Image (cartoon, grey):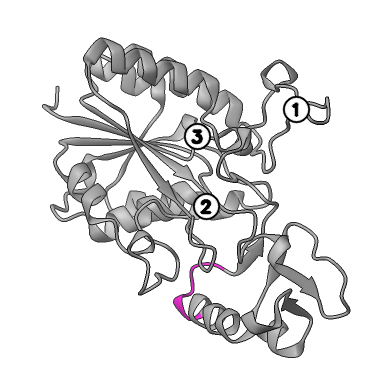
Amino acid sequence: MPRSIHLLIVDPQNDFCDLPETYLPTDPLTGLAHRPALPVAGAHADMQRLARFIDATAHALTSITVTLDSHHRLDIAHPTFWRAGNGDPVAPFTPITAAQLRAGEFVPRHDDDLPRTLAYLDELEARGRYTLMAWPVHCEIGTWGHNVHADVRAAYGRWEEARQFIVRKVPKGANPWTEHYSALMAEVPDADDPRSQLNRGLLDSLDRADLILVAGEAGSHCVKATVEHLAEHLPGGNLSRIVLLTDCMSPVAGFAQAQATFLQRMRDLGVQERTSTDMARALA
C-alpha cells in the first residue's frame, strides 16, 4: 500500500447535486424547498458512492482536501452581471463572447465595467479553454447550495474523528472578475488577487502524496480543469500516481464529450482511472 494517499474532492456541493426531495430543506422565508441551482445528473449517486468509499478506505487515507466553489451573487459568470443589448435580462446558460460584447448583443449592467469585461473575454478566449458562460447563480457564499453534500460531509467527519486529522477546505471563485473552474488557478488569474493565481500550497500538499485520488463535480468542468492544471504543474511529475475515481464524477448536461475528451487526454498522460469499488478493494 502506498505510504501517503491524498483524496482530492472537487466541489461536492449541494448546488451541483441532483438531490432527491428528502435531501431538500425548507427555506424559512418562503416555505418552499431549497433546490440545487446547477444540478448535475448523476451527482447525488456519485457523492453517495464517494461517501461509501471514504468509509471503506478511512484506514488508508492520510489526507483529504475538499475544494469549494465560492461565489458572490454578482459575478462575471452569473446573469446578474449582464443584460442584453436591448435591456432584457440574460437567461442562465447563455454563452457570451468578446465579439458579441463588441457588437452590443450583451453588455455589463454597469457601463463602467465594459473595458475590464472586454479585456477579460479577450484574454479568456486567447487561452482557448472555455467560452464564458452565464451560469445560474450558484454556490453563493453563505447559502445552503454552497454546503457540502450531506453524505460526503458525514463520511469525512467520521474520518476526521477516527484519524484525528482535519479535512482541508480550499475555497475558489470569490473573485467576481474571473471564472475559477480549477481548484489550482483561475482561468484568467488576476495580478492583484493571489487567490486567483496558482495555488502552490495545494500543489505542494498533493505532491507529497504517493497516490492522489480525485473525485467530485463536474467531470466536464471543475474536475477537468483541476486535473489538467494538476497534470501541468505537479512539481514531482509522475502522473501515474493520479487516480480518477470515474464513478464519483459526472458531466454537466450537454458537456459529456468534454468529459470524455478530458479523460482520454489524461489517459494519454499516464493518469489512472478506477472505480471507487475497485480502488477500495485495492486499498483494503
> Can you tell which of label 1 and label 2 is closer to the viewer?
1
Quarter of the image for the N terminus: give it. top left
Instruction: Identify residue for label 2.
Output: 221
The residue carrying pointer 3 sits among few (fewer than 14), some (14 to 19) or many (20 or more) residues within 10 Å by Cα, namely many
What separation in Å lies between label 1 and label 3 (alpha carbons)? Answer: 21 Å
**Residue 251 located within the stretch drawn in magenta:** no
The residue carrying pointer 2 sits among few (fewer than 14), some (14 to 19) or many (20 or more) residues within 10 Å by Cα, namely many
Residue type marked 1: Asp
Residue type marked 2: His
**Residue 128 located within the stretch drawn in magenta:** yes
Q: Identify the image quadrant of residue 84.
A: bottom right
In terms of secondary structure, where does tag 2 sit?
A: loop
Q: Position of residue 200 (x, y in %)?
A: 22, 56
Q: Position of residue 254 (x, y in %)?
A: 68, 51
Instruction: Identify residue for label 1.
Output: 27
Position above or below: 53 against 105:
above
Instruction: Identify residue for label 3.
Output: 12
Position of 42 compared to 123: left or right? right
Q: Position of residue 47 (x, y in %)?
A: 51, 26
Quarter of the image for the C terminus: give it. top left
Q: Number of labelled discs? A: 3
Residue at 68% x, 51% y: name it. 137
What residue span does the magenta drawing correspond to? 126-130
